[in-house]
Amino acid sequence: MSLEYTVEKIKDWAIDRGIHIANSTAQINKLFEEGGEIAKAFNKHNINGIKDGIGDVVVVLVVLSLQLNIDFTDCVNLAYNEIKDRRGKMINGVFVKEGDL
């Protein structure tokens, strides 16, 4: 199944449940809750929990973009276009942008 198809299914799911018009502040809070679940799974070396958490974060972000009337794919493309030519180097396991070196 393609990512585009899955994003559309997530949007349909949210619309069917009225989540697309729900409180965006609650959705932001859900994003941080799900991020915490990823961290918890990571710390326990629980790969299935990490996968579930990453998927949950994507769902939350798709729904948030729908609530804010922002195209999710545009957001991802914007981020990619910002990083695609970025240079830098790894320092202690963290990528540091060239401008921050």
Image (cartoon, grey):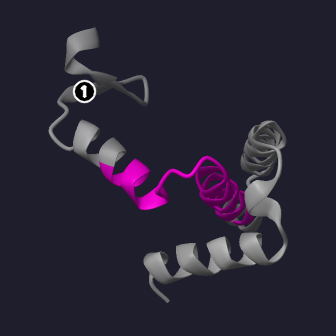
Give the magenta part as a residue range: 52-77
Quadrant hosting residue 24 = top right
Please say whether residue 57 is one of the residues in the magenta stretch: yes
Give the residue drawn at x 74%, y 72%.
15
Magenta span contains residue 69: yes
Secondary structure predominantly adopted by residues drawn in magenta: helix
Question: Most extreme residue toward the bottom, as rendered?
Answer: 1
Residue 43: % across, % down: 76, 43
How far from the left and from the top, in percent, is residue 56? 72, 60
- Residue drawn at x 78%, y 51% as measured from the top left: 41
Query: Which residue lies under the disc numbered 1?
Result: 89
Residue at 61% x, 57% y is 66
Q: Nearer the viewer, residue 59 or 66?
A: 66
Residue 56 in sight: yes
Q: Nearer the viewer, residue 39 or 10?
A: 10
Q: Amino acid at mark 1?
A: Lys
- The picture places residue 101, in percent across and down from the top left corner, at 25, 10
**Secondary element type, mark 1:** strand
Q: Is residue 85 left or right of residue 75?
A: left
Residue in the picture at 45% in, 76% down: 4
Q: Is 52 in front, or is 48?
A: 52
Residue 53 vertical placement versus 26 (above, below) = below
Relative side of 34 to 80, left or right: right
